[in-house]
Image (cartoon, rainbow, N blue to C red):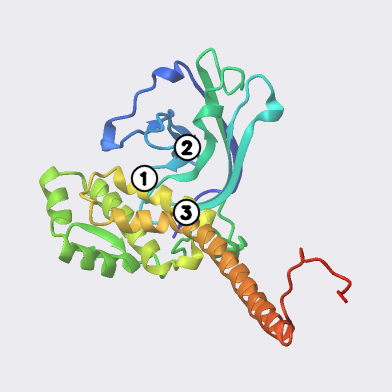
C-alpha cells in the first residue's frame, strides 16, 4: 500500500457567506451536497461537505472527504470537525474521530451535528449575519506503529488489511474490493439495470468505481451486521453510506426498505426494551394475582357473610 509522508497537523476554516441562499453542488450528480474549496495536506485534496438544506431530516450534517487519489493510497487521520459559535466560543460544537481514508474517497463525519432549529436560532450564535463558520483540523499519521487493532474495532467498519483490500475485476467495468464482488454479482443478477444504468451514462472509470464501491459498502454492511449491532454509531455509519450511495442515482427502490429497516432498528430496540419491561411487570402481577386468589379461597373457608348494617340486638323475652 502506498504510504504518504510523516504525520502533520493542518487546520482549515470554511467561512460560508449567504448561508441561507446555499444551493447544492450539482457536479458529479451529488444531491443536496455543498462542498468547501479544496485544502491540501500531504499533497492531496481534502474538503468539508455539508447537507445544508435538511430535506426530510432534522439535523445539519458535516463530513470530511478526500478525493483524486492514486490507487492504493491510504491515510489514517485523527480529525476534528467544528461548528463555530461566533458569539460564544465555549458553545462551539466539535466532533472528533479517527478514520482510515482510502483512494475510494467517501464521506466520513457526523450526520447529527446539530438540529436545524438550533442552527437557525437567531440568538444561537452559529449563524451570524448569514455567515456560518466550520473548521476541520486533521492529524495525518501513517506510522507502521499505528495500532491497527484500534482501527479494526472502530466505526465505520472497514476492510482494512491489504489482503482484504485486493481489487478484482467486476464485469469488465471496474476494479472492486474482493469482498464486495460476490455481493455485487448477486444483486446485479437480480437487478441488471444497475450495470446498464452506468453503461448508458458513459461515466468515467473512476466514477463507475466509486458508484459500485458505494453500493458494495452498503451491501457489505447489511450482510455482516446483525439486528443487535444497530446502536447509534452503526446507524450513523449506515446513514452516511446510504447518502453517499444515493448520490450516484441508481434505482435503489429495491434496497431502500432494507436500509430503512436497519435504520429503524434503534427505535425497535427501545420499544422492545419497553415491551419486555411491561411483560415482566404483567408476569409479576399475574403471579401475585394467583397468590392472592389462593389466599382468598383459603380465607373464605367457613366464612359467613353478614349484613354490617344490621342491629346487634339484645334479645327478646
* Viewer-proximal residue among 67 and 243: 243
Viewer can see residue 3 = no
Find the distance from the CA under tag 2 to the CA under tag 3: 14 Å
Q: Which residue is mark 1?
A: 243
Q: What residue would you read off at disc 2?
A: 61
Residue carrying label 3: 235
Residue 97, compared with residue 177, is above or below; it is: above
Residue ranking furthest to the front? 317
Give the quarter of the image for residue 25: top left
Residue 214 is left or right of residue 229, and the answer is left
Asked which secondary structure carries label 1, the reply is helix
Q: Residue at x 40, y 29 (%)?
A: 53
Distance CA(mark 3)–CA(mark 1): 12 Å
Q: Nearer the viewer, mark 3 or mark 1?
A: 3
Using residue 24 as the reference point, say whether residue 315 is left or right of it.
right
- Above or below, 158 relative to 24: below
Amino acid at each position: 500500500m502506498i504510504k504518504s509522508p510523516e504525520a502533520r497537523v493542518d487546520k482549515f476554516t470554511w467561512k460560508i457567506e449567504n448561508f441561507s441562499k446555499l444551493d447544492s453542488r450539482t457536479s458529479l450528480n451529488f444531491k443536496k451536497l455543498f462542498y468547501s474549496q479544496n485544502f491540501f495536506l500531504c499533497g492531496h485534496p481534502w474538503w468539508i461537505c455539508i447537507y445544508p438544506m435538511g430535506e426530510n431530516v432534522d439535523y445539519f450534517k458535516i463530513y470530511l472527504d478526500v478525493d483524486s487519489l492514486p490507487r492504493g493510497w491510504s491515510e489514517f487521520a485523527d480529525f476534528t470537525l467544528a461548528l463555530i459559535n461566533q458569539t460564544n466560543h465555549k458553545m462551539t460544537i466539535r466532533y472528533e474521530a479517527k478514520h482510515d481514508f482510502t483512494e475510494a474517497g467517501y464521506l466520513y463525519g457526523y450526520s447529527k451535528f446539530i438540529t436545524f432549529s438550533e442552527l437557525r436560532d437567531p440568538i444561537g450564535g452559529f449563524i451570524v449575519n448569514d455567515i456560518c463558520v466550520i473548521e476541520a483540523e486533521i492529524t495525518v499519521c501513517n506510522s507502521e506503529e499505528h495500532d491497527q487493532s484500534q482501527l479494526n474495532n472502530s466505526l465505520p467498519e472497514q476492510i482494512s488489511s491489504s489482503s482484504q483490500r485486493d481489487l478484482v475485476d467486476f464485469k469488465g467495468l471496474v476494479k472492486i474490493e474482493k469482498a464486495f464482488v460476490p455481493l455485487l454479482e448477486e444483486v446485479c443478477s437480480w437487478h441488471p439495470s444497475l450495470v446498464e444504468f452506468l453503461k448508458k451514462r458513459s461515466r468515467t472509470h473512476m466514477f463507475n468505481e466509486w458508484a459500485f464501491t458505494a453500493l458494495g459498502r452498503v451491501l457489505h454492511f447489511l450482510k455482516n451486521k446483525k439486528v443487535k449491532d444497530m446502536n447509534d454509531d452503526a446507524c450513523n455509519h449506515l446513514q452516511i453510506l446510504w447518502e453517499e450511495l444515493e448520490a450516484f442515482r441508481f434505482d435503489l427502490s429495491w434496497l431502500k426498505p432494507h436500509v430503512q429497516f436497519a435504520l429503524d432498528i434503534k427505535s425497535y430496540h427501545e420499544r422492545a426494551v419497553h415491551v419486555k419491561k411491561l411483560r415482566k411487570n404483567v408476569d409479576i402481577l399475574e403471579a401475585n394475582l394467583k397468590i392472592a386468589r389462593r389466599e382468598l379461597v383459603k380465607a373464605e373457608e367457613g366464612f359467613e357473610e353478614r349484613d354490617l348494617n344490621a342491629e346487634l340486638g339484645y334479645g327478646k323475652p
